[in-house]
Image (spheres, rainbow, N blue to C red):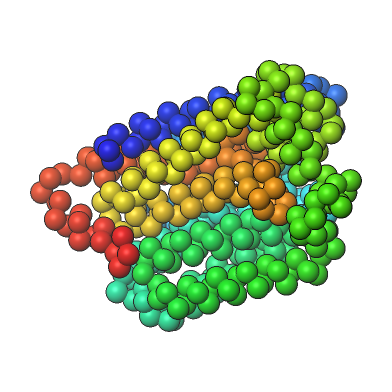
């Protein structure tokens, strides 16, 4: 199956992009901040889609070992970009968070660069230290300390969702690399405790947790989005109300074109298409894992697993939030939600997976034994 994994990945991503553009066309016209142009968001998303396809092509063509050699450049660039979120006239404060940087008409989230930079660093670090992965200092303390510097900046932006996502991706890469299970347990408990502690210090986050526990009580404030999302699911039923006929997007459901676009799919296109979206994500995750497991070396394996964890966990959290299975977190649905920098980052990750696939499949036969040795890790 792995020889066809790139084909499955390509078709699934293409399907998600088509669904995303169609649903954005349907929902964004009713966005509260439409800037006087009902096609404002669809135009911007189309530009970012072109940028994303360009970076996807570059990532698919450039040898992925280039990112191993230059990880420090991208890590440093991500740190600088995150710091710019706090610089006047560059950083933008929206809804109480400083997650965006504005350069003239262009706005983007530096945390999207940070996601990829962290994966580059961890994959490179553990690829060069295969025999030291189970030791405390090189296999846990040092990489954790370096990544924590970036996570601290993201926490200060008040972006707990991305912080948790990066922490989970770090856990996945460390697990695959062979970090001691006891240390991974410490990482999990410490990360969960840290997120809960920070959340308790912020009234808005505590409101979201309270709304998750008792949505009916907070349906007019902190639980508004999730309650309206449930109404959208109920209205759509199995068949849906028809494309363009959804009502929740008409300012009843805030951010229906971004983080809560998945309920709009359910309302307008019905349960069948919603399950199709979930199925396509499963195809993306399985195909990407097949590509990672058949990478020609350890760096390709860890890089592929990192990209899979970012895409899969982000999709799982968004679907969980919009179906009220998880507390409300501001994470978009990959390839579907409005958000240019996230779309470009996701397509860049797809390009990396395609490059790993190309090199793994085209590896000469006389290197097969070396490939198997390089690919073997303590757990995969």
Q: In the image, is 267 to the left or to the right of 345? A: right
65 displayed left or right of 155: left
The residue furthest bottom is 136
Q: Quadrant of the N terminus?
A: top left
On the image, the x and y values in percent for residue 264 come to 70, 31
Is residue 71 left or right of 26 when viewed as pictured?
left
Residue 225 at x, y percent in the picture: 79, 43
Total marks drawn? 0
Q: Residue at x 38, y 80 (%)?
A: 135
Q: Is residue 34 visible?
A: no
Tell me, yes or no, if residue 189 can be seen here: yes
Considering only vertical position in the picture, is 92 above or below 59?
Answer: below
Q: 368 above or below 167?
A: above
For the residue pair 229 and 365, the one nearer the viewer reads as 229
Residue 302 occupies which quadrant of the picture? bottom left
Quarter occupied by residue 132: bottom left
Residue sitting at x 62%, y 26%: 238
Q: Residue furthest right?
A: 220
The quarter of the image holding the C terminus is: bottom left
Residue extending farthest left: 366
Write the residue at 66% across / 30% down: 266
74 sits left or right of 367 in the view: right
Residue 124 in picture, x, y percent from top left: 40, 62
Residue at 56 percent of width and 63 percent of height: 167
């Amino acid at each position: 199956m792995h020889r066809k994994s790139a084909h499955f990945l390509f078709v699934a991503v293409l399907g998600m992009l088509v669904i995303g553009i169609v649903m954005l066309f349907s929902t964004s016209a009713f966005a509260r901040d439409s800037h006087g142009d009902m096609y404002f968001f669809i135009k911007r998303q189309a530009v970012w889609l072109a940028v994303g396809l360009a970076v996807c092509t570059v990532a698919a063509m450039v040898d992925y070992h280039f990112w191993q050699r230059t990880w420090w450049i991208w890590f440093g660039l991500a740190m600088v970009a995150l710091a710019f979120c706090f610089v006047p006239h560059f950083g933008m404060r929206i809804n109480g968070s400083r997650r965006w940087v504005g350069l003239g008409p262009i706005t983007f989230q530096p945390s999207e660069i940070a996601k990829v930079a962290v994966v580059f660093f961890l994959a490179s670090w553990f690829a060069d230290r295969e025999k030291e992965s189970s030791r405390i200092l090189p296999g846990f303390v040092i990489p954790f300390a370096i990544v924590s510097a970036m996570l601290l900046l993201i926490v200060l932006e008040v972006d707990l969702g991305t912080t948790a996502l990066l922490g989970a991706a770090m856990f996945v890469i460390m697990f695959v690399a062979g970090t001691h299970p006891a240390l991974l347990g410490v990482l999990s408990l410490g990360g969960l405790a840290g997120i809960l502690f920070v959340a308790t210090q912020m009234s808005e986050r505590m409101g979201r947790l309270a709304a998750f526990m008792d949505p009916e009580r907070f349906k007019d404030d902190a639980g508004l989005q999730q309650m309206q999302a449930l109404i959208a699911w109920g209205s759509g039923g199995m068949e849906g109300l028809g494309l363009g006929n959804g009502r929740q997007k008409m300012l009843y459901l805030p951010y229906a074109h971004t983080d809560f676009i998945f309920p709009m799919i359910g309302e307008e296109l019905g349960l069948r298409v919603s399950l199709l979206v979930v199925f396509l994500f499963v195809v993306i995750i399985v195909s990407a894992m097949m590509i990672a497991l058949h990478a020609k070396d350890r760096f390709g394996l860890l890089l592929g697993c990192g990209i899979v964890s970012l895409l899969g966990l982000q999709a799982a959290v968004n679907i969980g939030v919009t179906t009220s299975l998880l507390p409300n977190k501001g994470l978009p649905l990959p390839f579907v939600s409005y958000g240019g920098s996230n779309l470009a980052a996701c397509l860049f990750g797809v390009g990396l997976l395609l490059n790993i696939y190309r090199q793994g499949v085209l590896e000469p036969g006389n290197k097969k034994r070396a490939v198997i040795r390089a690919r073997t890790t303590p757990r995969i």
